[in-house]
Amino acid sequence: MLLVVDVGNTNTVLGLYDGEKLIHDWRIRTVIDHTVDEYGMLIYNLYKSSRISSREIRAIIISCVVPPMLNILEPLCLKYFNLKPLIVGPGIKTGMPIHYDNPKEVGADRIVNAVAGHEKYQKDLIIVDFGTATTFDYVTAKGEYMGGCIAPGIMISSEALFERAAKLPRVEFSKPKSVIAKDTVSSMQAGIMFGYAGLIDGIVERMKAETKLNQLVVATGGLARIIAPETKTIDVVDEMLTLEGLRLIYLRNN
């Protein structure tokens, strides 16, 4: 079995593949001051609850945008799985040309998404990943990564509103009944939800106009399924796109 690990700034997502089939996935918080053993016990308990032995794991691949986490995860893989993980980074085989001024600057998660998106859809794509930051990436039908843009994530925007406006409370991210809200909490939810939907549509429409193409728009990430119905431009929600990309990159390097 293959263990794939996507480390984001807020959450770390783990997936377990048996061949091409994703049989389990878990989402945990990314905490850089946890020790190797604390993460080891956490992951051990996840497997125990799923009745899987660590001895069944034959390989591990990691995508990480939080460099200090590699100082935890690499020793963890050696200690608890007796495996050296494959790390997505410069020099790894992706099978995808990266048209960026400095390819080393592109986040590993963006490349992983691009690889999975091209393999799965074989079309001109715009991939929108709802993470701590929201990324927009353009991938050609030929399988070329052309670049994109980065916006503050939904939760970053929500926290900034709460922290910088003294009278505004912290609110749950959910869809309000109306954009013309009648109370403070609903007003904040309307501004965040519909404002963010407008941001998504605005950027996607600009990318389509600039490329003169009508790309398929694929959304992924933890909040994709919540925000997608409020947009006009998202065509497909594919929450496990990053995990699938990690599986494909592992195969291309082995």
Image (cartoon, helix red, strand yellow):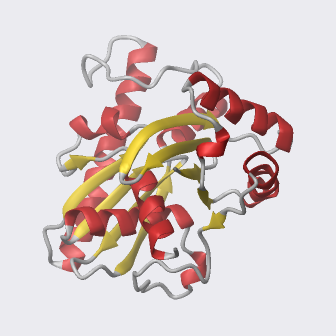
Where is residue 118? Give x, y as percent: 28, 69
Q: Nearer the viewer, residue 144 or 79?
A: 79
Q: Nearer the viewer, residue 190 or 63?
A: 63
Is any part of residue 70 visible from this angle? Answer: yes
Where is residue 226? Give x, y as percent: 33, 32
* Residue 165 placement: quadrant: top right
Residue drawn at 51 percent across, 20 percent down: 171
Where is residue 6? Give x, y as percent: 56, 52
Q: Is residue 194 above or below residue 200?
A: above
Q: Is residue 6 above or below residue 54?
A: below
Q: Nearer the viewer, residue 131 or 240?
A: 240
Q: Is residue 232 left or right of residue 21?
A: left
Is any part of residue 111 visible from this angle? Answer: no
Q: How many marks?
A: 0
Q: Is residue 12 left or right of residue 190?
A: right
Q: Is residue 1 left or right of residue 206?
A: right
Q: Is residue 41 above or below residue 145?
A: above
* Residue 197 placement: quadrant: top left
* Residue 78 placement: quadrant: bottom right
Farthest front residue?
55
Farthest top residue?
183
Q: Nearer the viewer, residue 126 or 202?
A: 126
Residue drawn at 17 percent across, 46 percent down: 232
Residue drawn at 43 percent across, 48 percent down: 18
Residue drawn at 35 percent across, 41 percent down: 224
Q: Is residue 73 left or right of residue 196?
A: right
Where is residue 109? Give x, y as percent: 51, 61
